[in-house]
Amino acid sequence: MANLGSLVTKIRSKNAGPFWITVDIFCGSDAVFEKVCHRMTPAVVASLTGLDAAAIRRFEMRDLLVLKLSFARHHVQGSRFDRDMHGAQIATLFAEWDIL
Amino acid sequence: MPTRVLVPSGVLGLGFDVAALERGIAARPDIICIDGGSTDSGPYYLGTGTSKYARDVCKAEWRHLMRARAQAGVPLVIGSCGTCGTNSAVDWMYDITTELAGELGQSLSVARLYADQPPSQIAEAFVAGRMTPLVPAPKIDDDSIRGFSNIVALAGAEAISVALASGADIVLAGRTTDTAVISALPIQNGDNAGGAWHGAKIAECGAFCSTNPGSGVILVEFDENGFTVEAMAEDAICTPHSVSAHMLYENVDPYILYEPGGHLDVTAATYSAQSNRRVRVEGSAWVPSDTYTVKLEAAHIAGYQTTMMAIIRDAHYVKNSLLWIERLTRFLHDKIADCTNLGINDYTLEFRLIGVNAALGRHENRQPTSDSMPVEVGVLLIITASDQTIATDLSKLINPFLLHFPLSEQEDLPTFAFPYSPAHSDRGALYEFALNHVLTLDQPMDAFSLKLSQIPEVRHG
């Protein structure tokens, strides 16, 4: 049992404008990058974010050993039902996800 | 010809290393450029046309930059003045500049580039089919547009170039793209366009592209093939990784960046270390578009809010806080229906249980267990209604129940902790972002206007 946060160098999430959030997973090594890209499937991302897998943009950036995931916010930044103005806390769901 | 652009910080108000700024000036830049805003601080600032950062802080930093400009004898440009880039925020920055010019004994020519869009004109553009929605776009019509509090268009490099061509010592720009203030002079000088936009994106957050983000100051040298970037603080280093990784930051797509008049494509860019401090970048491409579009930002009032806070320390209630809030919410809706003429759609009650799921709501997947219960739970209630009086009155109706509501009818009335009196806080208007659209222009300056001034003002007669 290992969560993703303990395996990779850094995970962050942030607004990409008021309508999107982007998650950057810095893997730190080729082996971890391969494993993360393999295991962090669109279905896993969909279950963590509550979105359709087809709605999630995915960038496997081998040069940087980064898996980048971008998705539209459930609630626009700062709108009535938004809970996290900067979108930075959703990274914790990814960090705590059990990659096995 | 090579163009050296000095970027003191990611935003005015966030601070920078003054010694690094001095090193930057010693490197003989052709222009000093800084960003003044972003949507990232939320819709309130655009809604009200005000700055997130304190005036005194902005003035203290701007004093350093005005001195540096005078020393270097080059233009000083700030984009997206006062967080939101409305005309009011540009004029706020102009007032600060005027005060400082007096204090520093400087005579200046100042260009103000305005980016406000009258709602009636944008409504007409919408009807005329000159607006294109981006994904995801809020639902709008011409009536709703007329009710927006503020609308700005994001100026491109061409508009900054027009301001620079006026010969101004200082350019105070309304809303611009983050990159346009930096890319304008290199493009004007005929440097590589892909390099100009890419270098501008890398430098727009100051030293975030280095190993010491807080130091602020970055120098970018643009030329016919690309650009070279260097951090000015002694303890900050730019590496190929720190520079290339910055394309990830706050970008949906790490390879493509849309700007007025085209897009940047960095798919083929190469990053190489030059000495152990500088990074050379080549191979970025600028792809012009057939039409010239500018992005629009708008905020509107979506209601008025009152908040309340209670703190639960009693372990029985801490353990059952989700059940308690579910029962309290149901009770309050019934009570409001009994005591007021409000319908269920006239207001919202948002309970955020701090210690349980306040940040992530229904996406929270960690449940407290008997071994890991929070010591206490904060109950934040956000009431939203169509006017402030209704929101405030609802908080007064709710007050005794937030204080005393029992988990079941069989138990004594609890009394939770209110941290202050009164227990409610009126927040005023709730602003929401209302546009994610682009506007097609015939000419890059069509949505913008320029105002030139001399400081001290020349008085006639």
Image: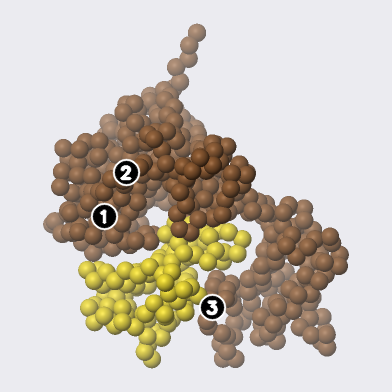
Chain colours: A yellow, B brown
Name which residue lies at 67% across and 54% down.
Answer: B303
Picture coordinates of residue B245 (x, y %)? 28, 63
Residue type pointed to by label 3: Glu
Residue type pointed to by label 2: Asp
Q: Which is nearer the eye, B362 or B345? A: B345
Residue of label 3: B364
The disc placed on residue B132 is none
Counting residues from the start of the chain, the first of labels 1 and 3 encountered is 1
Element type at marker 1?
A: strand
Does residue B322 appear left or right of residue B88 in this picture? right
Give the alpha-carbon distance from disc 1 to disc 3, as whole Å: 37 Å
Q: Which is nearer the eye, B310 or A59? A: A59
Which of the chains bears the disc numbered 3? B
Picture coordinates of residue B97 (x, y %)? 44, 33
Residue of label 1: B265
Give the alpha-carbon distance from disc 3 to disc 2, as whole Å: 45 Å
Name which residue lies at 37% across and 34% down.
Answer: B443
Residue of label 2: B290
Q: Which quarter of the picture shows residue A3?
A: bottom left
Q: Residue furthest top?
A: B461
Do circles 1 and 3 both sit on a common chain?
Answer: yes
Name which residue lies at 56% across and 85% down.
Answer: B367
Does residue B455 appear left or right of residue B138 in this picture? left
Counting residues from the start of the chain, the first of labels 2 and 1 encountered is 1
Q: Is residue B92 above or below residue B197?
A: above
Name which residue lies at 81% across and 66% down.
Answer: B336
